[in-house]
Image (cartoon, grey):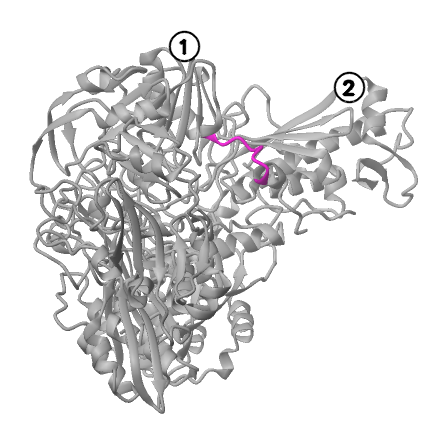
Amino acid sequence: MNEIIGKPIDRVDGKLKVSGGATYSAEYFPKNMVYGVLVLSTIPRGRIRNIDTSQAERVKGVVGIMTYKNSMSLHFPQGTDPGSGKYAEKDLLPLQNNRIYYDGQVIAAVMAETFEKAEYAAKLVKVDYETESAIFDLKANISKSYKPSSGGSQLQLKRGDADAAWQNAEVKMEQTYTTPVYHHNAMEPHASVAEWNGDQLMVYDATQAVAGVKSLLASMLGLPPEKVKVVSLYIGGGFGSKGFTWPNPIVTAMAAKMVNCPVKLVLSRQQMFTTAGRRSETIQKIALASNSSGKLTVIKHDTISESSFVDEFVETAGLATSMLYSCPNVEISHSLVRLNKVTPCPTRAPGEAPGTYAIEAAMDELAYQLKMDPIQLRLLNYAEMDEQKQKQFSSKNLKECYQRGADAIGWSQRNPQPRSMRKGNYLVGYGMATATYLANRIASAAKATLYADGHAEILSATQDIGTGTYTIMTQIAAEAFGLPVDRVTVKLGDSDYPRGANSGGSQVTASVGPPIRAAALAVIGKLISLAVSDTASPLHGRKEEDIIADNGRMYLKNHTDRGESYTEVLNRKGLQKLEAQAKTNVSTREPQGSNAVATGGADAAAEEESKTNPAVQEDQNVDRKLYSFHSFGAQFVKVLVDPDLGTVKVDKAVAVMDIGKVLNLKTAKSQIMGGMIFAIGMALLEGTAYDPNNGRVVTRDLAQYLVPVNADMPQFDIQFIDQPDPYISPIGAKGIGEIGITGMTAAIVNAIYHATGKRVRELPVTLDKLI
Amino acid sequence: MEPFKLIHPNDQHAAIASSGAANVKFIAGGTNLIDLMKLDIEKPAQLVDINSLKLQTIEALPNGSVRIGALVKNSDLAYHPVIVKNYPVLSEALLSGASPQLRNMATVGGNLLQRTRCPYFYDTSFPCNKRVPGSGCSAINGYNRNNAVLGTSTQCIATHPSDMCVAMAALGAIVHVEGLTGKRQIPFHEFHLLPEQTPQYETTLKHGELITAVELPPIRYSAKSHYLKVRDRHSYEFALASAAVALNVSNGRIEAARVALGGVGTKPWRSVEAEKALVGAAADEQSYRNAAEAALNGAKPFKDNAFKIELAKRTLVRALKTVGGMS
């Protein structure tokens, strides 16, 4: 049997991408297309008293200017999947009235024959505002905090009696940790191209959810869903900013209707800082108590984050804390303060990224307070089960992560005393932290087709946001089809395909992999049935379970020379193709018996789906109700700190990740590395600055908002436990997109403490905080 | 971006002749000007492309000076053997700036005219006296972590962004210019202006004057020089503080010194005070610290940038230690 899953094959779309052949959403040029440029508000709150477009209209080449005065009416989105491409600001449909809720709100779109003309004319739109007083500073407005209505009991968790246990605790640690606003800063800006053909709407959109944007556009524009098609073949990163839907595709579709020709609209880098989401600032208060030997008796984690006046989004920083350690008395709370800023939205590891920073920095502080090795403290409080949900973990090999990570970084050689280790001009520090992220899975569907020429195709309306989804899905499909990778084409990013998962919550692999596998197995099952029932086949009359399908050929398990190729069967039968569709909706356990692949698998047979009904309902995987699904890992960091200048260099970073089965070692390492680099940004560099007087973003480009560059990179050592999770799916792979950022920020901050003896609790740890 | 005309004169006289009209700008590498035009901060009606002028050479002159043509690319200058050997401070300063791609485009003349990266200057929605005289300074009471602590005024606290200029200030370079009325030479410390009440004026270059070259006068000890740049990330960022130093140390005594600071001043900040403090002093940490105190004497902090004063001192001390050692 030729194993393809797990191999570190190159990206199947790599050549297209590096040669410019991959078409991103801004790279479509339908006939007669014009360019749209957005005009954004420059006040944080108030009303548009007057908007004067006369000067802009006189610019030669301008074909239309859309404001709230002349735009079409939109419907509030109804019945769309809240998890998939959800409209980001439910109470602020674009260009419907003159209210301003934040600086950077869309107030007009200018369409012209060239981008330059549209851009020039957009600057000539004159807006007269009636400004009202606004608030935009979280710390200054904590008194306005409230418990969010969304999320409900999931956000306020309690077990045991934390207050009573706190009173009696032997060792106590209580600190506040803060993280600033972060921006996603994907390389590819938000981009949409919309074209109407009668009442049919076609939109190319940079999105993490083609299926979601399709239903959203239909709902908001008042169209039947079948009239809308959304395509997103290649995406240059999303990190959550393209997970919710911002006004851009909607405005583009409205504009194309208004000017009666296709419109392209791309956000500028500056606009992406105000008009396409962000991660909220957080203020996290952590209280830990333990007995004198380090056994936790209390964990409290209270998070205050920002919301807006037009929607509600909670940065769920405390959720992971509820299951991370064994502790009888736990209290988790989340509060919000509404501010006049764009609504926050998911950002890589929403909740967990800032949350694991706070809890893992706090655990480090407690360890030093106890004069205990930070790893030892974590082992002593190891959670054998999810104590909040009272469920076993579907799989957890975290102890091995700690051990291997400690070995790789050289933890035992560290002198635990802070500010005790030096190398030349530098102080040396070691830090570690636990990483964790949800192992999500949602309903998804895929269609598999085997063609008579021996190549196969997979269709699913999920998308590859740059992570390698095309590649790993090709590997899954190739192994299930029994074909080499180069004979399988995976097509994603088209809302006409069977509905796949949105690319969020690290869920695509676990959600879309199983139906792809099942559909391909079902096709091969059909093929084997055709062969055994065909008197002309050398396999005629054989039992299906005795037949292996591999490398384009079916043969007897015990007589490998006895068999025939896929193409021979199809050609003899006069079939152009054989197809099947599957969706994620059955128990994940591998069917009994030794030859699941050749039989097609019990799950595959059960999942074969009517081609006329690609809609997918709730994921009915019963195991999801029985177990708590999380990925785990351990992050270790060695830093060098210049004690005079305060500069920090992450010298080495080790991650050992327990994310189930690794599908492709190369893309998996890249995913984890990308997350770790995000965390270097969080720990040391990133943070959006707002003007204290008018709430406008000041750091509006990549020169002012610092993300890590090559020179900031440490030596990386990324390892995997690579044990399949037995309950998430027959493939055993959990998602991997987000866990890399978790824990790592704390590991860096903890290492800086070990190096310098200075505990910085306000991110980022810039040099001014260390000199 | 405002519509503009672009012309390509092929000799210096034609270029200068065409630049006399109002609202005309020379363009060479364009690494700063084009950005500013896209953001509607610069709105020239006409650009004069000077890339075909013969200003691309680096020559060692008989008097020991080095004459650098205004169109020499930053990367060519940084890697020129004479600069690497005799003026390491300049080579290091150039290589600490921007990215290889930008250095391959950016010219010496353009670098002298780089404009501040103050975020309020960059966003036309904010008042900015440098961009719109009299509109007010948003940085003084705004987000000012990256702004200046030396040479500020009530009208402007924008930092001069160049690394190259800091090294040239320390080296006492001479800027050669030519205009309709003839040629002249401008000592480096007279080239850039303090903001005072008119931050919109940044240099003493007159309208229509073209920078033709920068001359580095001979300094016996310029091979013993160093540029240290401190910033949040390890590359591709402007300085929070930087120091360009050259020292002549003999028997543990400092005989001559050149000191300039970057990232903290409203112009490339030559510190004659620090140089005075160093000359005649022992080459030791105390002298370096004294020089640093002298250099930052009179520095004025704002809400977010007070740390720059101590950071600049430590940066200067480290740079001096690196060149002068510790006797």
Q: Position of residue B60 (x, y in %)?
A: 45, 62
Which of the 4 image quarters holds residue B128?
top left
Sequence-wise, which precedes: disc 1 or disc 2?
1
Which residue position is annotated with label 1?
Answer: A199
Give residue A547's position: percent from left, percent from top.
82, 39
Residue A313 appears in view: no
Is residue A414 rendered to the left or right of residue B129?
Answer: right
Q: Compare residues B299 and A75 and report the one nearer the observer.
A: B299
Indicate which disc residue A575 carries: 2
Amino acid at the residue labelled 1: Asp
Closer to us: mark 1 or mark 2?
1
Give the alpha-carbon distance from disc 1 to disc 2, as whole Å: 37 Å
B217 or A51: nearer the eye? Answer: B217
Answer few, some or many: residues within 10 Å of disc 2's Cα (few below 14, many 20 plus, some between 14 and 19).
Answer: few
Residue A697 horizontal/vertical position (percent):
23, 45
Q: Chain of mark 2?
A: A
Could you tell me if residue A452 is visible in this image?
yes
* Spot occupied by residue B321 in the image (x, y as percentages of width and height): 35, 81
Q: Quadrant of the C terminus of chain B?
A: bottom left
First to last magenta residue range: A18-25
